[in-house]
Amino acid sequence: MNFFDNPPALSWYAWLSRRLWPIPRAPSLISITPKKIRPCMDCIPTLANKTRAKIYTNFLSKYFTSNVQTYVYPEIFESLGDDLIGAELCDKTGELIGVVFSMYVGLINNMPAGLINWLCVRPDMRKKGVTDCLLNSIQTFAYPRTIHLFRNDGWLKSPLPPLWTDSRIYRKRVRRMTTAVIKVPLEQKRSIIYEAWKKAHPMGLILDDPSRKNSLVEVWEYKSNGTLIILQQTFENTLFTSCRWCEIIFWSCNNSYAGTLSIEAIIDALPYDWIEAPSTLPNLGNWSSGGQSSWCIHGLDPGCPVLRPVLSLLAN
């Protein structure tokens, strides 16, 4: 069964109608019933196991690669549990065919939500129903996590209408070490980040759970004026090099030239080689265009407006 044949999501017709005739309404849950796990090519998908962490790392490193190589540390998969849930499919010889993971991103309307990430199928097994099998399975394995978000780089690839779309920029950092820039715990700056986000995006969504400790999101501060950059590593390396990528997901600064200079100074002090960010990031014009990025959501009606920017402080 195709995962997107009859999805519990806002239809394109309703999405377009609300764009044309907007009437404010709050997001609401869409009921989901877990499906029976079904075989694919006579093989049964199973729950991912942390003892196979290195296998998942090697599989993604080999097949989840385009212009950059994805290298998700085995330690990430060794944390498989309540927050990171995975589904895998192996052939009859026990060789891995495909994997998908759902990472907990917090509560939406008091329901747990997850981000579908690292969905990867071995090239010779693509277009054979493996992707649908894995997506149906992860929805069942992750239950009662009924809300799932999808994120695509490039133009919209999901059959679901977008929850948010933005354009991207990127640049290589100039190696400048300075004591003016420090890494600070997210817990210390959470209230400042919330306030800045709600001011900039009053109808946006914040995905977070302060009860969870998260080592994936980093907060960097320019000490003299309190400018903040919130980022997450992307687990991507430029091919044939050790150059690492990260993504800026939000920032907090005064809207001035000094604030822009502080942002650029933080970036050049980061322990990453390439930085991607939304095109709205204050900058000095020394960035290149990086295409589009889109969010979609499954299990939640976003209400109206249907386009809501997303700040995810647990997983991106």
Image: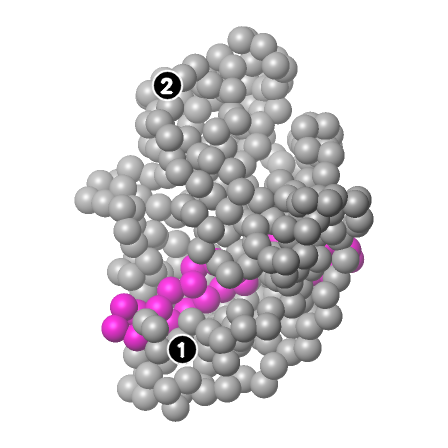
Q: Residue 259: horizontal and vertical position, in percent? A: 56, 14
First in sequence, mark 2 or 1: give its number. Answer: 1
Q: Helix or strand or loop: what does disc 1 sit on?
A: loop
Magenta span: 97-125
Residue corresponding to mark 1: 129
Q: Is residue 102 magenta?
A: yes
Count of picture labels: 2
Where is residue 103, by image quadrant? bottom right
Q: Is residue 259 something one can see in this rendering? A: yes
Q: Residue 307 or 142: which is nearer the viewer?
A: 307
Identified by mark 1, the residue type is: Gly
Left or right of 26 on screen, residue 124:
left
Q: Is residue 117 magenta?
A: yes
- Local crowd at mark 2 within 10 Å, few (<14), some, or many (≥20)? few
Q: Residue 36 or 60: which is nearer the viewer?
A: 36
Q: Residue 118: horizontal and vertical position, in percent? A: 43, 59
Q: Is residue 149 something one can see in this rendering? A: no
Residue corresponding to mark 2: 286
